[in-house]
Amino acid sequence: MIFYKLFWVFTKIGFFGFGGGYAMLSLIQEEVVDRNSWMTKQEFTDLVAISQLTPGPIGINTATYAGYSALIHAGYTHPIAMLGAAMTTIALCLPSFAMISVISYFFLKFRSNRYFSSAMDGIRPISLALIALAALSLTNEDNFIDYMSPILFITAIVCSVKFKVHPILILLGAALVGLVIY
């Protein structure tokens, strides 16, 4: 039953996750943490951090680990959990693959159509809102564990936006500060 539910949940996320992996994070958190309790908020936050560090799209990395974690928490063995990870990855990608296959066929045909153009104009701000929601959902009391957490958070934003420091350098710096402080 859990395999069916995982497949359904991640197919649904793949279908409604417009805007890419970061936009999917709030949908994944809603299903995996809040609705189905397959992992805790802290595990999900750790998962997002690890998914950002590993190569590949964050939405797919998150889905892969979430499928694995859900089956481990349900008492399945590691090989079965790896099959669950593969299944959730496929389930997440399947709707996009199907939609892109259809859209690419019709895109050239309808790109000058004003209704199609208007629909695309409506999707853009929704994608931005989903990305903002994902960022806001990660800023909770579980992640700001002491007085240094908000300082590190603000420092990372300032370094990125104002000083254009490369994200890898920010991550390495934060890891070094974490090792020294914690």
Image (spheres, rainbow, N blue to C red):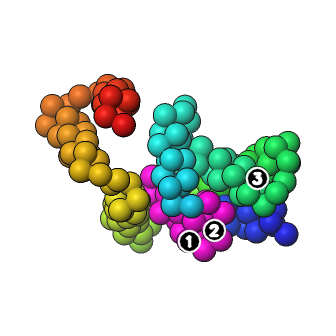
Q: Name the residue under label 1.
A: 34
What amino acid is labelled 2 in the image? Ser
Q: Would you say residue 181 is visible in this rendering?
A: yes
Using the image, determine if residue 148 lies above or below residue 7: above
Horizontally, residue 110 falls left or right of residue 97, namely left
Could one spot residue 91 in this view of the protein?
no
Could you tell whether 135 is left or right of 111 in the image? left
- Farthest residue to the bottom: give it: 35
Using the rendered view, name the quadrant where residue 126 is placed.
bottom left
Tell me where residue 87 appears, x and y as whole percent: 77, 51
Q: What residue type is labelled 3?
A: Ile
Instruction: Of the two numbered discs 3 and 1 on the same chain, state the one appearing first in sequence.
Output: 1
Residue to which mark 2 is pinned:
37
Residue 35 lies within the magenta run? yes
Give the image location of residue 23, x and y in percent.
Answer: 45, 57
Q: Give how far apart the Cα atoms at labels 3 and 1 are.
A: 18 Å
Which residue occupies the foreground of this view, 91 or 144? Answer: 144
